[in-house]
Image: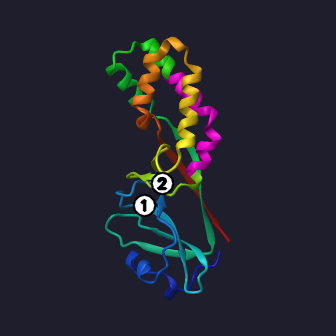
Amino acid sequence: METEARNEIPQSFGEIISRGWLYSVPVSKKPYSELVKEEFLLVKNQQHQVQVLRRWRNRIDEPLQYEVFRGWLDIRLTNIILARQEIKKALEKEGFVMEEISEFIALYQASFDINRGVVEEEIKKSSDVEKTQHPLIGYLNLMADGRDAVSDSIFYNIQRLFPCQKAKLIRFAEENMDELMTIKVVRKFKIYRE
């Protein structure tokens, strides 16, 4: 738990970049726009060892403070959220009744749950989760960049789970596949000190 000597601790984020220390993007429990917060990132020191950099301020009128320590930053997937409200609104706009909407969303969720393990693997290996204003929340389109197998499997299950008389709902799914395949990714992080 030994902190680096004072001359090893950067005095600004620009110094981190200029030294070539940056190894990961900052993570925090607060949005990027929040100025009073604690955030962590991985950095490489001059010996190319990966360490954790903690930067924080307690009040807006204080300068940022820095601490570098040996440890690790573990970021984990905690939740995958489907665009249920957006889908509901789109189905209402198309004139579907509430019973059909509820059935579609339930079957959409079921088809997604069948493929949950594959989707989680895609998220782990993907570097193109769209960033939001919060470092632990992002969006991923499962149809983008060669992930057709995942979206095809989900769509296949939508077709399989729907009764054949629900052709209008299947057509809706085909026409809105891009929106159906965009998921919200929620993560959490934990800091380990050596």
- Marks 2 and 1 in Cβ contact (< 8 Å): yes
How many angstroms separate mark 2 from mark 1 (CA)?
Answer: 8 Å
Q: Is residue 111 magenta?
A: yes
Amino acid at dot 1: Lys
Position of 55 relative to 35 (above/below): below
Amino acid at dot 2: Lys
The local crowd at label 2, few if under 14, some if 14 to 19, many if 20 or more residues have their Cα within 10 Å, is some
Q: Earlier in the sequence, mark 2 or mark 1?
A: 2
In the displayed structure, does residue 69 sit left or right of residue 59? right
User: 66 or 16, which is in the foreground?
Assistant: 16
Quarter of the image that includes the N terminus: bottom right
Could you say which disc has been placed on residue 37 in the image?
1
What residue do we see at 62% from left, 43% from top?
118
Position of 109 relative to 51 (above/below): above
Residue range (magenta): 105-123
In the displayed structure, does residue 178 sit left or right of residue 164? left
x, y (%) of residue 182?
45, 40
What residue do we see at 33% from left, 20% from top?
94
Q: Circle 2 sits on which residue? A: 29
Position of 73 relative to 66 (above/below): above
Location of residue 12 by image quarter: bottom left
- Determine whether the residue tagged by mark 2 lies in a helix, strand or loop: loop
What residue do we see at 39% from left, 30% from top?
175
In the displayed structure, does residue 162 sit left or right of residue 33? right
User: 47 or 159, which is in the foreground?
Assistant: 159
Magenta-drawn stretch, dominant element (helix, strand or loop): helix
Could you say which disc has been placed on residue 73 in the image?
none
Q: Is residue 24 magenta?
A: no
x, y (%) of residue 139?
45, 46
